[in-house]
Amino acid sequence: MDRTRDGSGLKARIELIDLARGAALAAMAVYHFTWDLEFFSYVQAGTTAAGGWKFFARSIASSFLFLVGVSLFLAHGHGVRWPGFWRRLAMIGGAAAAISLATWIAVPKAFIFFGILHQIALASLIGLLFLRLPWMLNLAAAVAVIAAPHFLRSAFFDHPAWWWLGLSTANPRSNDYVPVFPWFGAVLAGIAAAGLARRSGLLPRLAALPAPSSARPLMLAGRHSLAFYLVHQPLLIAGIWLFSQAIPASPESPEEAVGRSCQASCTPVRDIAFCTRYCGCVLDALRREDLLDEVVAGSGDVSLGDRIEEVTGMCMAEAEGAIDEGGRE
């Protein structure tokens, strides 16, 4: 609950935080809608995994987790209200488990084992340890958590049991991967910001500012963020699927189909620079040998499978070598 105490000692809800959370949810829906269009081949493959769209996605996740930290401080900064805390944690944890199960059934090779809801659940627990610390110390901790993947990555963390930390040498494949490092840093930054706001007397002033009446739909979404998160993507997918039955996407060329498949399998695991080199190499090799049509047709020929394995292995080494020569990206 995004509440603070005003000068009379009464609790007052900060409507602007509801509005900020609703805006983050709306931005998330825009990103997911574009991702769904890409999935149904209405948008070029790899669009949402690169450039401005990639930055957009990270900004949305960062802002949402920042607000988690702010809300955690406002709700429990004066003392943890355990009944409400456990109730909220059970709801988020249950929703995270349901998403893991649903995606494991639908896309077992890229299921969501530690997405944003898993992060929020764990961050809510760990964040309690930071609520009473000075805001400057929390800000320093946020910087350290965000920087950690640049210094602490190790093959020791490559075992799946440690993937939730985010310190493995390569990111595991998942449709939503939000590990502790660096993403808990955004939560800590939110706790630090809320602590500074309380210390400076800003919270009562924020509580006194009403949100514009035109923003009520966003505020409503912000107050019921978990329900919005769980419902919006199934509705978007269902809507686009229905549209595709009436107006199907233009058929892909063999090159587009192979490129999309390659990017889809690569981007959850490696960064866009690597995947661009790797998939470009694969396409060039298959094009030179006039194998694109056979790959798309999926003939199941053993010799074709062996050749594809050779090509992907060669291109993997070539892409790795190019990154090593230019410095790891």
Image (cartoon, helix red, strand yellow):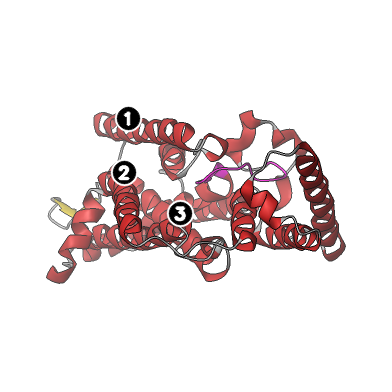
- Amino acid tagged 3: Trp
How crowded pointer 2 is (Cα within 10 Å; few <14, some 14-19, many 20+) is rated as some
> Mark 2 or mark 3: which comes first in sequence?
3
Q: Which mark is residue 230?
A: 2
Look at 62% across and 59% down and name the residue there.
254
Q: Which mark is residue 135?
A: 3
Q: How many numbered circles does the render carry?
A: 3
Q: Quadrant of residue 329?
A: bottom right
| Image: magenta residue range | 168-180
- Amino acid tagged 1: Ala
**Is 50 positioned to the left or the right of 307 in the image?**
left
Q: Are marks 3 and 1 in contact (CB under 8 Å)?
A: no
Q: Is residue 63 visible?
A: no
Number of the front mark, 2 or 3: 2
Q: Which element carries disc 3, helix, strand or loop?
A: helix
Q: Name the chief secondary structure element in magenta.
A: loop
- Amino acid tagged 2: Leu
Give the CA distance from mark 2 to mark 1: 15 Å
Look at 77% across and 44% down and name the residue there.
304
Give the CA distance from mark 3 to mark 1: 28 Å
Q: Position of residue 105 (x, y in %)?
A: 45, 31
How crowded pointer 1 is (Cα within 10 Å; few <14, some 14-19, many 20+) is rated as few
Q: Is residue 178 magenta?
A: yes
Q: Position of residue 136 (x, y in %)?
A: 50, 56
**Is 277 positioned to the left or the right of 257 in the image?**
right
Q: Which mark is residue 232?
A: none
Look at 47% across and 65% down and name the residue there.
43
Number of the front mark, 2 or 1: 2
